């Protein structure tokens, strides 16, 4: 059976969370690709075991931790090569809800944007159990990115998204260098530069219950450095980094 949707889930030491997420995803009409970076806790084996019966879970196992950006690029390449119409990004840690995934799928089907972003910072969006410091970090990262890059997107760092593959293939992924959550900012910027239509749809983001966050100072500094460089270079060339983006309600 040819399915339209491939959900790409990058994992690093998510054995407990993935055991909760995969059975829920298997209830939906989609295929699942796990990109695991040699998790010492056995996440990859657990995913294979969970997928045995359905045959709908593929695990790509890389030898070492290579970063979120590179995991998604590998996943996109896999999905593009196999002709999926839509490619979904979703965290394994339980922060992204399957109920919200259904509304993102409805949004992309009905409104046909090139990218739908599950957004915490639009009307109707929310975060649960997130420490103030994390909320502040996410909001500041978005304010800073918007200040330097322009555009209308309110949650550029969000990692819960659906791309229309037809448009995604226009992005030269080889030249996308961001590794951490800056990858999400860069992909949003690239999509906008190509004139892609971007829609934000509200989600409730829930702090993980199991495992540990991979957020680090290095990841934060990467975002500050790259966003500043893109913003300044656009200003220098008197060019807006973002081309008009659309965020229809
Ligand atoms: N394959 C792979 N997956 C990763 C890597 N880093 C993080 N992940 C996964 O990417 C997803 C998001 O990582 P989190 O640790 O939740 O980081 P985050 O969502 O940016 O940060 P929090 O807000 O603290 O949750 C999770 O499913 C991780 O397991 C990596 O280097 N390689
Ligand atoms: Mg997370």
Image: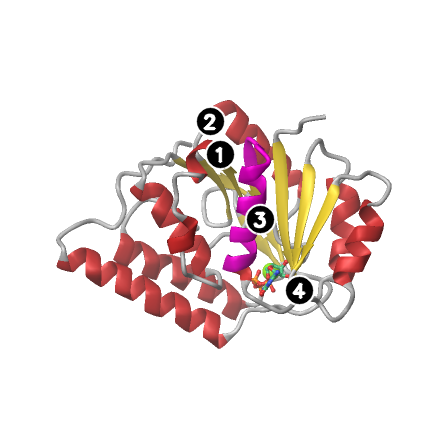
- Judging depth in this view, the residue of 207 and 42 nearest the camera is 42
Disc number at residue 112?
Answer: 2
Q: Work out how far the residue at label 2 is from the one at label 4, CA to CA, in angstroms.
A: 32 Å
Q: Work out how far the residue at label 4 is from the one at label 1, CA to CA, in angstroms.
A: 26 Å
N-term mark: 4 or 1: 4
Most distant residue in the bottom direction: 217
Q: Work out how far the residue at label 2 is from the one at label 3, CA to CA, in angstroms.
A: 22 Å
**SS for callout 2:** loop
Q: Residues within 10 Å of mark 1 (few under 14, many from 20)?
A: many
Disc number at residue 75?
Answer: 3
Q: Residues within 10 Å of mark 2 (few under 14, many from 20)?
A: some
Q: Position of residue 120 (x, y in %)?
A: 51, 49
| Residue 236 appears in the rendering | yes
N-term mark: 2 or 3: 3
Q: Residue at x 58, y 44 (%)?
A: 78
Mark 1 in CB contact with mark 2 (< 8 angstroms): yes
Screen quadrant of the N terminus: top right
N-term mark: 1 or 3: 3
In the image, is the residue at mark 4 within 8 Å of ligand 1 by its beta carbon?
A: yes
Q: Is residue 203 left or right of residue 221?
A: right
Q: Position of residue 16 (x, y in %)?
A: 78, 61
Determine which residue is flagged by label 1: 164
**Highlighted range, magenta:** 69-87
Ligand 2, what quadrant? Answer: bottom right
Determine which residue is flagged by label 4: 12
- Judging depth in this view, the residue of 63 and 221 nearest the camera is 63
Q: Is residue 31 above or below residue 20?
A: above
N-term mark: 3 or 4: 4
């Amino acid at each position: 059976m040819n399915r339209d949707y491939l959900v790409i889930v990058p994992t690093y030491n998510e054995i407990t969370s993935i055991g909760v997420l995969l059975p829920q995803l298997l209830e939906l009409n989609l295929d699942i690709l796990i990109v695991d970076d040699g998790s010492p806790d056995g996440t990859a084996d657990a995913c294979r075991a969970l997928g045995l019966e359905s045959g709908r879970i593929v695990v790509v196992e890389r030898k070492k931790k290579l970063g979120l950006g590179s995991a998604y690029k590998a996943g996109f390449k896999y999905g593009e090569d196999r002709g999926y119409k839509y490619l979904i990004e979703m965290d394994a840690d339980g922060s992204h809800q399957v109920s919200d995934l259904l509304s993102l799928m409805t949004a992309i089907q009905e409104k046909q944007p090139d990218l739908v972003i599950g957004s915490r910072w639009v009307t109707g969006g929310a975060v649960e159990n997130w420490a103030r410091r994390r909320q502040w970090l996410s909001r500041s990262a978005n304010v800073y990115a918007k200040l330097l890059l322009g555009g209308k997107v309110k949650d550029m760092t969000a990692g819960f998204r659906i791309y229309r593959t037809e448009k995604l293939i226009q992005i030269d992924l080889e030249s996308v260098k961001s590794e951490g959550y800056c990858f999400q900012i860069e992909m949003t910027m690239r999509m906008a530069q190509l004139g892609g239509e971007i829609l934000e749809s509200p989600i409730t983001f829930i702090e993980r219950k199991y495992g540990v966050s991979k957020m680090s100072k290095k990841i934060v500094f990467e975002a500050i450095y790259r966003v500043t460089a893109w913003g300044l270079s656009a200003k220098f060339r008197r060019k807006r980094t973002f081309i008009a983006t659309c965020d229809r309600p």
